Structures are given as structure tokens and as C-alpha cells.
Image: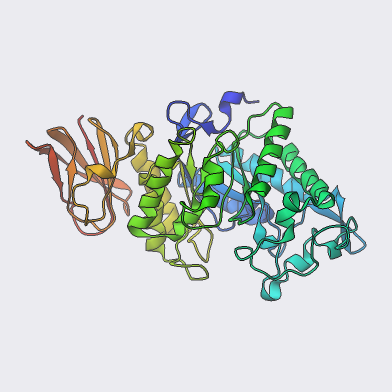
Amino acid sequence: MFSDDDRIRPWRDNRYYWEYNGKPTLLLGGSDEDNLFNHPELMMRNLEALAECGGNYIRCTLSCRDPGNLWPFAMVDGRYDLDRFDARFWGRLRSCLREARKRDIIVQVELWDPHDFWDRGDAKIWSRNPWNPAMNVNYTAENTRLKERWDIHPSTQPTPFFLSPVLKDDVLLSYQEKFVVKVLEETLDFPNVLYCIDNEVRAPPEWTLYWARLVHRVAREHGVEVQLTEMWDPWDLRHELHSVTYAHPELFTFTEVSQNNWNSGRTHYERLIWFRNTLMKYGGPRPMNNVKIYGAPEPRKQAIPELNVDRFWKCIFAGCASARFHRPPTGIGLTETSRRTIKAARTFTSSFNLFNCEPRPDLIEDAEREAYCLAEPGETYALYLPRGSRVKLRAGISKVKTMWFNVEKCRFTGTETLVSEDYVFRIKPPSRGLWLALLSTS
């Protein structure tokens, strides 16, 4: 058994980060599928590999569109019955949560994935989806607002499925509610679960607010305080849809900034800093999660490992609470490169008090060079130098011990003491390439 203090929740001493089992923790992850629970053999391989390299975070989209996946409903005479659940589907889900818990891995569950609700080319996902009126025995296109055919990409126009509260589609809503309640009944017993309403959605705010209130109500009835967020589709965190999340701290106890990971370089980092500062105006700090970090320059392109790794480190140095490599082909999943990076991130961030630090871009004087700083001023300064550039750090103290960390070898490789009369340290990496540095007063 576990107590409420064992559950994943924002860390009480710095709510930008998580705590689990009563201790602050940085969530680091990667996997080769988003819906691992629906790929049982791959799930076990990924969980073992992730735990071995120090990872503790996976994504669990309740998606069923891949070959071999199960849908949550039982089939009767060639059509699904939304009043009858398929025990095999829910058994897979609970098995995933149970195996993850054994390894202290946090699972972020997404209730809906809009990509399951449209017909993409020859895949015809919506045409075989149990929620399609043509595929179930419970309702029709006449007594709901649903269409039997829908081939519009969800980022262009949401399907009526994601408009049910707005359209007052009570027939559909009743079955949607039954599904969400079932998800909660199957998962609330686990202390290692975070909840996200959608994957990259562009539905109206009424949709998200409806489900947020329902999730909290059902959780309270079970005596559980849940951690909930939404993942909006726009890449720009300044888009008005993202304001629905940060302006409702009473509903959304953490934030999901994954779509920002389509951006690169300074834009990628600076949007995270903007979002972090905005949270202070709307209820104060909350964890900023990255359940998927892309490695492709744009959608439908192949991931570039170096780009994926760079975005991963920038998320950490922007003070985010989690960083997870997205699945192939637009991410590098749980490859040798991602496992090595996760191990390096765990080793490096465990060598100082990360949870007392904050991103301090203002301490970097060489604005034209890429360098990123996490600091507990007067005590510790961590630097990420993606290209091994020389930079100046305005530390406000006169003497520091500097340790260089080699990501490829996952170890500190050298130590030197720096002294500065003007409190500005000239930092020169051992060589070109990706370097991390740790500067401390002790």
C-alpha cells in the first residue's frame, strides 16, 4: 500500500518540479511507442531499458490505431457495443501501470487522441473506430452529431466528436463520460499516474474545461487528488489556446508544453522561459512537462538525433519538470543515443541540487553565443554549451570550482578553480562540441 504522500504531485518546496514517494524528482524518458500498454512485448522491453539508463517517465496515449492494438469495447456481430468493455484492453492498461510502478516510472495517460478520429489516407482509422456510428450498436449519425466519414486533419478542423459539449450532443456525451469514468476507475489506484486530456488538440476551450471538471469530480468521489493538464496543438506557447491551461490553475495542476518542441535554438528556449514567467501571473509555479520532444525539423520528416538531443537538454535547462524523447520517426525513441543522453542527464543533474535552481539566462553575457544556465546564485551554476563556445558568466562571486561533464562518456572529466576580481568568469570548454559545466563555491 502507499499513502497520499507517495503519489506523484508538485514538489511542495518548488512547484516547478515533481515529487514522488515524498522526494523531488526530475522526469526523464523515452519510448518507441506512445501507447506502450497496447504493445505488451515492446512495453516490457522499453520499461526494462528505460529503468536501466535511469529513466522514469513514459507516455500512455489511450490510442488503438496500430496493428495488433485492442479497442476498449467488446465487439458483437461485427460491431462494437459501447456499453460493454473489453477486459483485455483494460488488463493491458493496468499491467503497464503496474510494471511501471515496480520500476518507479511515472506514466502520463492521455484520454483522447484526435488522430484516432479521422481517416488518414489508406489507414481509414475513423472508419474502423468503435466511436464511429457505423461501427457500434449504440447510436447513429441521425441521433448524434457524428459523421460516418471524416477525412479532415484534426489540426485543420476538429471532428464533431471533440465538439460534443458545445453541440449539446447528449447521446455521445453519455458514452464519452462512461469511458472517462472507466479510465479513472482503472487507474486511480496507482500513485504513478499523471493525466492529460488530449494529444495536440485544437478543440474549443469548452471541450477541455468540460473534461477537466469531470475528471476532478470523479477523482474526488474516489478520495484522490489527480494531477491533470491539456496538450494544445499550437507550437507557439503564446497562442490563446494555451491560456486555457495556465489561466485555470484550479483545474490544471501542471502544464504540457510539448508542441513547443517543434521550435529550435533560442526560440525553443525563450518560449519556455516566457511560459514559465507567465505561470507566475496565474497562480504561481506549476510543473512544465514535455511528454514528447521531437527530433525532426518539421512534421513528417525523419528525426535528426543531434536536434532531438539539443531540444532535450534545453528543456532541462529551461527549468522544465520532464523531458521525454518522442517515438520514431519524428523522435529518436529509446535508441542508444537517447538512453545514453538520459543516463547523462540523470548523472549530471544528480550532482547538484537541481531542485533549488532556476533558469538564469540573464547571467550569460555573450548573448550572441548559445549558452544556457541553471543557477542557485551564490552556490551553484550549471551550464549547457551545445557547441562548446566560450562564454562569460556573471556569477556575483569571485571564486568557483569548475567541473566539466562529458555527455558521451557520461562522466566529469576535469576540475579547475577560477578566480575573477570582476565576478565575471570566462568559461572555455575543453574542446568543441556539446559540453556541460558545473560551477560551485564548494
Place of residue 192 in the rendered image (x, y in percent of width and height, measured from the top left): 59, 37
Of 362 and 182, the residue lying toward us: 362
Q: Is residue 412 above or below residue 77?
A: above
Q: Is residue 82 left or right of residue 236?
A: right
Of 41 and 319, the residue lying toward us: 319
As drawn, which residue projects farthest toward the left?
421
Place of residue 314 in the rendered image (x, y in percent of width and height, measured from the top left): 37, 51
Q: Is residue 228 above or below residue 432?
A: above
Q: Is residue 113 above or below residue 25?
A: below
Residue at 74%, 59% in the rendered image? 160
Place of residue 262 in the rendered image (x, y in percent of width and height, measured from the top left): 45, 60
Q: Quadrant of the C terminus?
A: top left
Residue 421, visible in the rendered structure: yes
Residue 313, visible in the rendered structure: no
Q: Is residue 16 left or right of residue 80?
A: left
Q: Quadrant of the N terminus?
A: top right
The coloring applied to the image is rainbow
Q: Is residue 173 left or right of residue 415?
A: right
Q: Is residue 408 above or below residue 217?
A: below
Residue at 48%, 36% in the rendered image? 282
Place of residue 397 in the rendered image (x, y in percent of width and height, measured from the top left): 15, 32
Residue at 60%, 63% in the rendered image? 155
Number of marks drawn: 0
As drawn, which residue projects farthest toward the bottom?
122
Of 420 and 340, the residue lying toward us: 420
